[in-house]
Image (cartoon, rainbow, N blue to C red):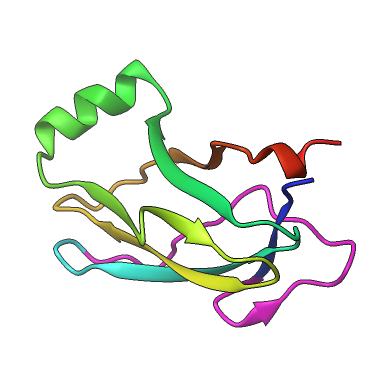
């Protein structure tokens, strides 16, 4: 089965049964990018083709982004392949012109699941 696990956030190693549902980027200053690092491990025995997607949370957020054209969340690498038993560090960067909270849903999708990963 294709299975990915968050191993660490900003060098904080998660315990075996610990999971992450939310990540906060705090202490942001307008026009200065702030980055969080998420380490994700492929616990499968097959390569996993992945892609991050960033979703807007609400119509209100869309209006705020129109006011603040340069608000951005970027994830690098955005897509690629994680080899079996390998870990990749993903940089999640936030930058805004305004000093107000923004909320995004970022999701890591597994694409093209190989037949051997299906049980």
Q: Quadrant of the N terminus?
A: top right
- Residue occupying image coordinates x 44% and y 45%: 51
Residue 72 in the image: x percent, y percent?
Answer: 23, 49
Residue 102 in the image: x percent, y percent?
Answer: 36, 42
Front-lying residue, 37 or 85: 85
Front-lying residue, 77 or 99: 77
* Residue 53 lies in the magenta-colored region: no
| Side (left or right) of 58 relative to 65 | right
- Residue occupying image coordinates x 54% and y 77%: 10
Hey, which quadrant is residue 7 in on the image?
bottom right
| Side (left or right) of 108 relative to 60 | right
Segment colored magenta: 8-29
| Side (left or right) of 26 relative to 111 | left
- Residue occupying image coordinates x 56% and y 56%: 23
Residue reaching furthest to the bottom: 11
Q: Quadrant of the C terminus?
A: top right
Check the image and report above or below for 42 versus 102: below
Majority SS type along the magenta span: loop
Check the image and report above or below for 3 versus 82: above
Residue reaching furthest to the front: 116
Numbered circles on residues, count: 0
Residue 101 in the image: x percent, y percent?
Answer: 36, 46
Check the image and report above or below for 23 versus 64: below
- Residue occupying image coordinates x 43% and y 27%: 57
* Residue 19 lies in the magenta-colored region: yes
Front-lying residue, 105 or 68: 105
Hey, which quadrant is residue 115 in on the image?
top right
| Side (left or right) of 19 relative to 79 | right
Residue 108 in the image: x percent, y percent?
Answer: 53, 45
Hey, which quadrant is residue 60 in on the image?
top left
């Amino acid at each position: 089965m294709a299975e990915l696990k968050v191993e660490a956030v900003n060098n904080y190693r998660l315990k075996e049964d610990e999971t992450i549902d939310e990540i906060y980027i705090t202490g942001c200053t307008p026009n200065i990018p702030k980055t969080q690092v998420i380490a994700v491990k492929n616990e499968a025995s097959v390569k996993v083709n992945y892609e991050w997607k960033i979703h807007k949370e609400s119509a209100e957020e869309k209006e705020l982004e129109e006011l603040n054209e340069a608000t951005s969340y970027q994830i690098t690498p955005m897509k690629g392949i994680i080899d079996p038993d390998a870990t990749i560090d993903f940089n999640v960067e936030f930058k805004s012109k305004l000093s107000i909270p923004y909320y995004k849903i970022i999701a890591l999708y597994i694409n093209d699941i190989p037949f051997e990963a299906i049980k």
